[in-house]
Image (cartoon, rainbow, N blue to C red):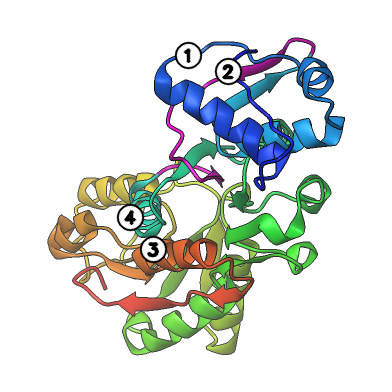
Amino acid sequence: MSFISVKEKLSTPKYKQIILSIEQALLGGTLKKGDQLPSVNNIRDKFSLSRDTVLKALNELKTRGIIQSIAGKGYYIINENINTTQKVFLLFDELNSFKEDLYNAFLSNLDTNTQVDIYFHHFNYDVFSKLIYESIGNYNYYVIMPANLKQTNKILEKLPADKVYILDQTHDELTQYSGIYQPFEKDIFNNLTKGLDLIKTYQKLILLFQEQKQPQGMLLGFKSFCEQNNLDHEVVNNLQNRTPKTGEIYLIPDDRNLIVILKKIKEAQLKLAKDIGIISYNDTILKEIVEGGITTISTDFNKMGAQLAQMINNKMTLKIENPSTLILRHSL
């Protein structure tokens, strides 16, 4: 414990002196990754401190990602970089090309010396809750993409509300949290309306909607648009046994099924745009090129990532709507 120094007459708070001692030991090589720190009680007793003072120092180092606590064993060095000033817990539903754009924009716009740890729940409530429970107290901010999981508020209430940001989808029970969201119901209605003249040249509009993954607002907006415009429509949960027919338009929210429907169109010897139409969700560079270009309804994920970083950099508590636009291309 010789590397820890706490002096009575210094103006620096005692908990800060503990932090500085550990930082200096890391810089000097006295402490290294994997080393165990003295126990809370040992530091308390040696320097006649309160337990709260020692814990305040250790918790700050913990949220900066420099140390880790292991139940029943103590505190260990996990990161020798003392320049990390804050840590962000980032929980995505899954990784795909447009969320990668969001992630990269977020990282590139964050203040320096901010560490981001990214996790994925893959639309599994048990994984979602486990990851959050294990993160409690380890981060300065928590960025959560709840997707369409239900009752996530019961898990998130364990976190400090002013440190939580909700991303992409939000729900009625999460209104107390800041974040950036897509208004899916409004977006799909408004953007389909922009393409109404083209849509009317086809006979039937079909939405591929997988309840486990897709936002409920997408389904509501789609049905409202079709009913208001008296359009023949159908909602399907997979394309496995479906053969595309002349006069149909498919609204495909995910990239995997976009490839599936394109393959099926070729197998049916149909001509895209002339015989059959496609509207995809979330734009990528690939969609600019495939089949001469795929029409998309898409939000700006780079903007979303940059705005999120700005909110965390400036400790802003806001709810920001990130709307979508219709990008017309050859597939419609």
Q: Label 2's element? A: loop
Q: Quadrant of residue 5?
A: top right
Mark 1 lies on residue: 30
- Looking at this view, is 58 or 258 the one in front? 58
Alpha carbons under labels 3 and 4: distance apart? 13 Å
Alpha carbons under labels 3 and 1: distance apart? 44 Å
Q: Is residue 75 visible?
A: yes
Mark 2 lies on residue: 3
Alpha carbons under labels 1 and 2: distance apart? 8 Å
Indicate which disc, 3 or 4, sits on the residue closer to the N terminus. Answer: 4
Alpha carbons under labels 3 and 2: distance apart? 47 Å
Task: State yes or no: residue 41 in magenta.
Answer: no
Left or right: 48 with respect to 332?
right
Residue at (61%, 34%) from the top-left corner? 19
Foreground mark, 3 or 2?
Answer: 2
Type of residue at label 4? Ser
Type of residue at label 1? Thr
Residue that sits furthest to the front in the current view = 9
Residue at (60%, 62%) from the top-left corner? 169
Q: Which residues are magenta?
A: 72-95
Q: Label 1's element? A: loop
Q: How busy is the neighbourhood of tag 2: few (under 14 within 10 Å), some, or many (20 plus)?
A: few
Indicate which disc, 2 or 4, sits on the residue closer to the N terminus. Answer: 2
Mark 4 lies on residue: 108
Task: State yes or no: residue 87 in magenta.
Answer: yes
Name the mark on residue 307: none
Type of residue at label 3? Phe
Q: How busy is the neighbourhood of tag 1: few (under 14 within 10 Å), some, or many (20 plus)?
A: few
